[in-house]
Image (spheres, coloured by chain):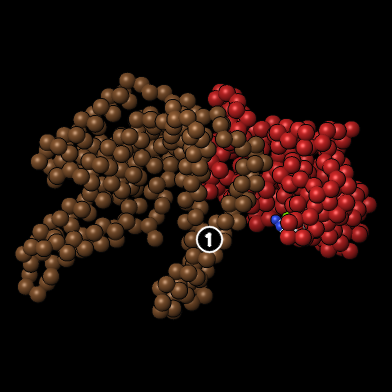
Chain colours: A brown, B red
Amino acid sequence: MADVGVFEYRGTESLLQRYDARHKLPALVAVAAGLLRSPPLGLLAMSGVVACAALSSRVPLAGILRQLRGFSAILVLALVAEAFSVPGARIAPGLPATAQGVESGALLAWRLGALIVAGALFAGSTSVSMVRSAVAWYLRPFPFVPAGRIATMLSLTVTFIPLVFDTYRGIHEAALSRGMALRRNPLRSARIVAVPLLIRCFSRTDAVVSAMEARCYVDERTVASLRSRPEDWAITLGVAGVTSASLFWLR
Amino acid sequence: MSLLEVRGVSHRFPDGRTALREVSLSIESGELLLIAGPNGSGKTVLMKHLNGLLAPTSGVVLLEGRPLADCLAEARRRVGLIFQDADAQIVGQTVREDVAFGPENLRLSEEEVRRRADAAMSAVGLLGLADQAPHRLSGGEKRRLAVAGVLAMEPSVVIFDEPFAALDYPGIRQVLREILRLHGGGHTVVVITHEIEKVLAHATRMAIMSAGTIARVGTAAELIDVVESYGIRRPRLDARGIRGITWLT
Ligand SMILES: Nc1ncnc2c1ncn2[C@@H]1O[C@H](COP(=O)(O)OP(=O)(O)O)[C@@H](O)[C@H]1O
Ligand SMILES: [Mg+2]
């Protein structure tokens, strides 16, 4: 299981952390689109954007890469799947992989890898309360949309992901220590872990609801005020420029 | 007038189980009340009645003479609960965010939220960990975080449910010190536990619950010889008597 620590918020002061969440959110969407859809030269430019973000985040790069190791299986899988499925000239007689497949697989793995880094940088530099404020800000113009409640649901979901993983790990280890690995049928093994995981999550949800109510939960809470400065606009315009260039011109 | 008064409260769950039967108990301002009782005796259910999380099937709970049903929002703010499951009460991504949750719900201004969160974190000694992820804290620190989250609401009474469960020796001492500091600072404190030897020496009064009723109320000295008959371990006393069984030496 991939380490989710990589998607954990760290309160370090940095340019990327100060970048207004109302800008950062659409910028992430733009970067994701650019990474996934650009032709190779554009992909290079978009990777440059991600690299700049990594530099300005002050998160040690070695740390990011080490934590991303867990995702390497996904990348290898993407490469292999492409290599064997894209039609073209075989790279060696008897091996059903094609040169075109390897090329497009490598490109796909690159896209996904850069996307994961971008996601990790976003999560690591943006506290949920900032995301909550930004989402509430975007939803506020729409009447009948419970912006406050949606924003809280979002922040709770993100907050509990690490806990769900911890719980999963505990149950999985307990099952392993009782000989689950001896089972041949992977579906049965999955069920052995999934059922207690769901039960634990539901009963924890009950407890969380009580605890929130005890602390006077209301939908429309005080939200952190967001400040956008000239730099934020400059960064956003820069990202928008590079992304459109990558998507449409850098062929 | 008592700060909190439980008057003839019974609680029956929808599945037909009766968890409280005709419970009456008053909590006086400034006291450190110990509520003891074996598992399943109704301690947690009683606690949830004290700030209106559960409503009595019959009977009434009064906050300074007013029924809770008439002042629910005030009761939630003034009666702070520290639940047994420390993980389940964490709703923030960082220590600071979690502590700010209560004041944000009170819709205080951003500066006031910040001021209260800082005050509460420094009161429990967590200011240095303000930007940490809460689930990375130790057991004792998590319990102190829960205390900070409640303190930020500026409550009149703080109620701890099994505060020593699943803590190691240093964790128990941290939490115990926190409890005594709150009480020393003028808060009314209620400690619910079956591990009575950890707080008995510090409690001003003690109640014993058994099968959904309050079986006895009295001082530690009056009740220490009967606790075993209610399924609670009797602490061993040395020459100093009850005063001598503290975990803080
Ligand atoms: N949500 C519930 N539904 C039904 N019965 C419950 C519920 N919560 C608690 N009970 C029952 O109420 C009784 C008292 O529980 P509780 O107050 O949790 O005991 P404890 O003294 O250990 O804290 C127990 O018999 C328990 O099974
Ligand atoms: Mg209990």
The N terminus of chain B sits in image quarter: top right
Residue B91 location, quadrant: top right
| A34 or A8: nearer the viewer | A34
Secondary structure under tag 1 reads helix
Residue A89 location, quadrant: bottom left
| A145 or A130: nearer the viewer | A145
Residue B126 vs residue B182: left or right? left
In this view, the residue farthest toward the right is B222
Residue B203 vs residue A61: left or right? right
Residue A36 vs residue A251: left or right? right
Query: Dot 1 corresponds to which residue?
Result: A198
Give the percent coordinates (x, y) of residue B151: 67, 35
Give the answer, above or below, for where A181 lies relative to B125: below
Q: Residue at 52%, 69% (x, y): give it.
A: A174
Q: Residues within 10 Å of mark 1 (few under 14, many from 20)?
A: some
| A134 or B82: nearer the viewer | A134
